[in-house]
Image (cartoon, rainbow, N blue to C red):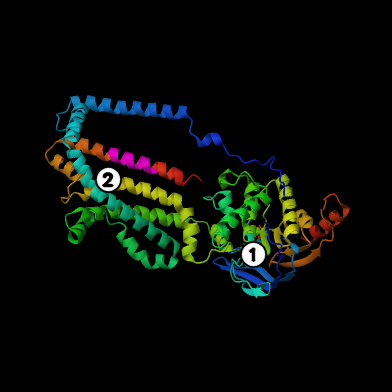
């Protein structure tokens, strides 16, 4: 069996603001963010450190409430994490006491899928991210790239229509990163999921995205949304790629 | 999708998982040397002291064998087990449950904090009056004293373990559909805190063997009672023999638990 080709979700971010109050004072992390993502679209969010990318990610994921505004997933307001979203963090956050297989199966435990189907699904995902042979390894024995593959498979297991990722490839070496990027594009093309991908790497954003949302600082807000009209697979050496790269770069 | 894992193979060090045999033998040999040295010093010291101050290792060994042969030792061990085992188990379980509950729930923690802080410094021995009043001079009373000791160690170990569980893991679990406190505690908090919880259990087991003596002060029979009686009669050889029994029991239970701990925490 394969992952459902159910397609993606639509996301609407409506006038989202976030203010953190602390003893040191108030931080306006996000000020009035507004954009929409279409079904099956791959959108990257780039911006300098501290511009509120992670804050926006957490609000999108329902892990934190916005101070103002709201996020709509397929038309309904997001208030808590739900099964329509798969979330991948930069630091993997695998469950260290579980093997690769068990990590991937975590989200399926509660679902009332028959055990046999569950097992098949887990195996399919492990294969999909190229970890066959490591099913029974514990996270401590995996490299960073492999851990991120497990995290991706784990998020895909619940078959979310939206994949939310916060600098997922930030902690791996350049070569592994490129491999993971290609794999992600393949999975995305295969499944038609909507992907919202946070990164501070402009090249990564231009390589992956249909559209790049460029954010600025103080308070975090959208500078511009750049549509990347380059055929895939994209190559960095392409002159078209280069000009998009320069364009996004200049906005940051 | 075929993926090439070349260049990012895992760094599993198979070798380091299995302790090198040579190292083990070396350590065992050194340990034996230390032990032999200790017994040697003891023997030399005993030459200059009367038996009732410091009996020689030979005297102690003879007494040990005699006590063992007469069946007295086994009886005492059995009698102590009757409160050590239930006391340890009950105290450990309650301590873990309370530690997890208070470590997890800020509300419970705030409500109980003054009470916990008041009770915490009370030494188990100070509660002997209550043990007698509530349970009587019997195994239940002695088990109560032992349970108090186990409780606090396990309480703080579990509490600390739960507090240290990363919020990120909880976020991941939530995003994967885990809802509600009970589910989160079961599927994330307990496994994540299990190393600390296990360390608490292990420390508690040791502490409870120490408390066996204290818990028998008020007359419950067992190893502790035997030690106290022999002390009053200045039978130092008997005292040392039963101290050895405590040490050996501790060693046995601790090794068994350590083996179990290694199996449960293979993922570490
Ligand atoms: N929990 C919090 N409490 C207080 N301030 C916070 C909190 N989280 C984030 N902030 C502040 O909000 C702003 C945005 O932070 P955020 O982590 O979203 O930035 P970012 O774009 O993800 O940065 P980076 O690229 O370094 O990951 C920062 O000024 C940060 O200090
Ligand atoms: Mg961030």
Give the residue displayed 38% in from the left and 50% down from the top.
B200
Range covered by the magenta-colored residues: B247-257
Q: Nearer the viewer, residue B120 or B97?
A: B97
Question: Which residue matches tag 2?
Answer: B210
- For ligand 1, the image quadrant comes to bottom right
Residue B114, labelled with which disc?
none
**Neighbour class for label 1 at 10 Å: few (<14), some, many (≥20)?**
many
Give the residue displayed 70% in from the left and 72% down from the top.
A12
CB at mark 1 closer than 8 A to ligand 2?
A: no
Tell me the subunit letter for badge 1. Answer: A
Inspect this view and state whether residue A93 appears.
no
Secondary structure mostly seen in magenta is: helix
In the depicted structure, whether residue A199 falls above or below residue B111: above
Residue B35 x, y percent position in the rendering: 32, 29
Q: Nearer the viewer, mark 1 or mark 2?
A: 1
Q: Residue furthest left?
A: B233
Inspect this view and state whether residue B138 appears.
yes
Question: Which residue matches tag 1?
Answer: A85
Q: In the figure, is residue A189 to the left or right of B105?
A: right
Is residue B255 on the magenta stretch? yes
Give the residue displayed 31% in from the left and 26% down from the top.
B37
Residue A113 x, y percent position in the rendering: 57, 61
Discs 1 and 2 carry the same chain letter: no
Quadrant of res A48? bottom right
Query: How many angstroms separate mark 1 from mark 2 (CA)?
Result: 53 Å
In the depicted structure, whether residue B72 falls above or below residue B98: above
Q: Residue furthest right?
A: A239
Residue A118 x, y percent position in the rendering: 59, 57
Q: In the figure, is residue A77 to the left or right of B147?
A: right
Is residue B96 on the magenta stretch? no
């Amino acid at each position: 069996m394969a992952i459902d080709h159910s397609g993606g979700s639509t996301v609407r971010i409506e006038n989202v603001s976030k203010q953190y109050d602390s003893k040191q004072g108030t931080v306006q992390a996000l000020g009035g963010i507004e954009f929409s993502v279409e079904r099956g679209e791959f959108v990257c969010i780039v911006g300098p450190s501290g511009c509120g990318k992670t804050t926006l990610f957490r609000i999108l994921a329902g892990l934190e409430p916005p101070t103002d505004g709201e996020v709509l997933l397929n038309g309904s307001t997001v208030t808590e994490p739900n099964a329509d979203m798969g979330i991948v963090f930069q630091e993997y956050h695998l469950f260290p006491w579980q093997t690769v297989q068990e990590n991937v199966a975590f989200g399926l435990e509660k679902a009332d899928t028959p055990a046999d189907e569950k097992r098949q699904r887990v195996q399919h995902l492990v294969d999909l991210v190229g970890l066959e042979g490591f099913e029974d390894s514990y996270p401590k024995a995996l490299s960073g790239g492999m851990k991120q593959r497990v995290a991706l498979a784990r998020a895909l297991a619940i078959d979310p229509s939206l994949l939310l990722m916060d600098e997922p490839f930030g902690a791996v070496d350049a070569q592994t990163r490129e491999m993971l990027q290609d794999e992600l594009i393949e999975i995305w093309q295969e499944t038609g999921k909507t992907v919202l991908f946070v990164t501070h790497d402009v090249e990564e954003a231009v390589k992956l995205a249909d559209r790049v949302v460029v954010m600025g600082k103080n308070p975090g807000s959208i500078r511009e949304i750049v549509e990347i009209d380059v055929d895939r697979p994209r190559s960095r050496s392409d002159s078209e790629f280069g000009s998009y790269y320069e364009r996004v770069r200049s906005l940051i | 999708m075929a993926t090439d894992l070349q260049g990012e193979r895992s760094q599993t060090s198979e070798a380091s998982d299995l302790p090198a045999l040579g190292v083990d033998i070396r350590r065992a040999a050194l340990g034996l040397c230390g032990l032999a040295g200790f017994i040697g010093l003891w023997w030399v010291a005993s030459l200059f002291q009367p038996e009732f101050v410091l009996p020689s290792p030979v005297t102690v060994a003879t007494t040990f064998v005699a006590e063992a042969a007469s069946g007295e030792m086994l009886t005492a061990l059995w009698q102590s087990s009757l409160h050590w085992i239930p006391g340890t188990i009950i105290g450990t379980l309650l301590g873990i449950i309370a530690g997890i509950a208070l470590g997890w729930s800020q509300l419970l923690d705030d409500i109980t904090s003054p009470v916990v802080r008041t009770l915490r410094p009370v030494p188990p021995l100070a509660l002997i009056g209550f043990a007698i009043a509530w349970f009587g001079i019997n195994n239940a009373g002695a088990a109560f004293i032992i349970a108090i000791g186990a409780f606090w160690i396990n309480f703080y170990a579990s509490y600390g373990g739960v507090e240290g569980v990363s919020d990120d893991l909880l976020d991941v679990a939530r995003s994967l559909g885990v809802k509600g406190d009970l589910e989160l505690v079961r599927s994330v908090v307990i496994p994540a805190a299990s190393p600390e919880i296990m360390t608490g259990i292990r420390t508690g087991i040791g502490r409870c063997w120490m408390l066996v003596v204290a818990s028998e002060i008020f007359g419950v029979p067992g190893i502790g009672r035997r030690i106290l009686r022999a002390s009053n009669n200045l039978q130092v050889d008997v005292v040392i023999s039963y101290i050895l029994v405590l040490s050996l029991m501790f060693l046995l239970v601790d090794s068994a638990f350590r083996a179990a701990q290694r199996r449960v925490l293979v993922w570490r």
